[in-house]
Image (cartoon, coloured by chain):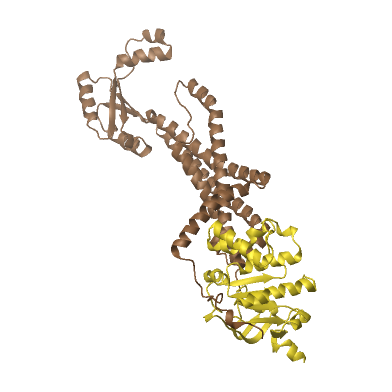
Amino acid sequence: MILFEEVSKIYADDQIALNKVDFHLKQGEMAFITGHSGSGKSTLLKLVSLMERPTTGRIVLNGNDISHIKGNDIPYLRRHIGMIFQDHRLLMNRTVLENVGLPLLIEGYSRYEIKRRSLAALDKVGLTGKESSFPINLSGGEQQRVGIARAIINQPPLLLADEPTGNLDPKLSLEILTLFESLNQFGMSVLIATHDLGLIAKMRYRTLTLRDGDMINDGLLRERNE
Amino acid sequence: MSNNMGAKRKLSGSPKINKVSFIGRVKATLVQHVHQVIHSFFELWKTPFATMMTILVLGVALSLPTVFHVVYKNVERVSGQWDSASEVSLFLKKNISEERVQVLINKLGLYEDIEAVTYISRHQALLEFKEMSGFSKALSYLDENPLPAVLVVVPVKSAMNAAGSKLLVAKLEREQDIDLVSVDIDWIEKLQAIFYLVVDMVIGIAALLLLSVLLIVSNTIRLNILNQRDEIEVLKLVGATNSFIQLPYIYIGAWYGFLGGVIAWFFSWVLVIWLESGVMNLTGLYQAQFQIISLNFDESITLLIVAALLGFIASFISVKQYLVKIEPK
């Protein structure tokens, strides 16, 4: 699904965000990326979602080298990636239903189809009945669920989540991770960046650990701790 | 790893760059365009005061070139009525016989650059002079008629200019029976030179004002983009193409231009109504008939299209510039 081969990202001020990172996320696999602030977690996700381009190295997404993809093709690639953010990135002037249906609106689906699939996605994340609400009137956990519904509405094979539980309490965080787990059970590859080691430890998934741009470990966190 | 790989066939599609089918894209694009044309119009009125201010500024900027055009059009019509100024008066020799005059008239009739020739006999000239000058009593004391016979020559349209008149005068001066050829070309030349200078200045000013329209719309759209920066970034992240993001802004820009054009049309119409009675009074004093005219239908449509196009171009540049900035590096 995702293959990184000696991928480095160096910003204009010579700051090394990622240093020759290698990893392979298989199709249908769920994994965590962890590390302290500034370790390169978000940069890694930005490289996969083409919000940034690598300075050196090769990134392959399901067999396609995306390191030098043309700018015009990026939107079409992003439609195959669901993205979830710590700050949810919802449009506050649009209803929950409109927020969730955004990816389908962009792809040119009919209004009926958008509504049908948006309601189904909201049902999947446990937000039935909230479709007419505005995000501002929802709790942090609910807003994150709206973000997840938007990310999964077009059934992308890959889900990227950048600190999805960063603003949530432990109970809600676990609920959100359980939701990711259930989506993974349906076949989505899931890559979650988080610095919440306690949360990762509760779930037995592969964990990639970054420090100052270097990948220092790749394996099960609990096993490593043991 | 607790992943259940067995039940994962259903959603594990390929993230190849699969685009929506061509027909699907065309249909979706058309629907989007129609939706955005309507939606962007209502979007403008979410901030009615700011929108009105912008449209009025655009209207004023567009109305100046429009008014210049109306003035130019009317001045051109007036100058067209000065064709008689191109008439050439031929003062004939005093001793010329009526037969010779007739031969000369026939000869002039063969000139390609002469439209018509009118003969004013010495007697007729004296009568007219008495009537116009008010010296009829004084003139009756003269022993003989001091006025020569005159042929008034009207050149063809193509010769009714400074160069054409000069050429015709040169030819007429060679005729033996003509004593004096009189045509006042200088003032026509000077007036034409002033007129063309004013036209050039007006074109320059109009170009600057149209440029200001581009800048006003571009800046307004830039501010809109800055206000909706987060929304644009979210749209990009969920797979919106640049054209999808650009569309509402481009239509808003086109609406600004179009509505500015409507205001400009209205201003020019009001100006014509306002000047109409004054112009009629003035031309009445010169015993002439002239009615000032406003933009016709074709010109009005052209104004609206050009205005909308300027808004369209300005907003396109503005959005494109922003989208280039947020492309991945």
Q: Which residue is at the far front? A: B7
Q: Closer to the camera, B18 or B98? A: B18
In this rendering, would B246 be left or right of B184?
right
Q: Nearer the viewer, residue B281 or B239?
A: B239
**Going by the image, does B103 lie left or right of B92?**
left
Q: Is B216 displayed left or right of B136 in the figure?
A: right
- Residue B282 placed where, x, y %? 51, 24
Say which colour chain B has.
brown
Q: Residue at x 73, y 90 (%)?
A: A223
The colour one sees for chain A in the rendered image is yellow
Q: Residue at x 47, y 22 (%)?
A: B286
Q: Quadrant of the C terminus of chain B?
A: bottom right
Would residue B213 be visible to someone looking at this image?
Answer: no
The answer to which quarter of the image holds residue A81 is bottom right
Quadrant into which the N terminus of chain B falls? bottom right
At which x and y percent is residue A1?
Answer: 57, 81
Q: Is residue A12 above or below residue B318?
A: below
Splitting the image into 4 quarters, where does residue B118 fall? Answer: top left
- Residue B207 in percent (x, y) is at 53, 48
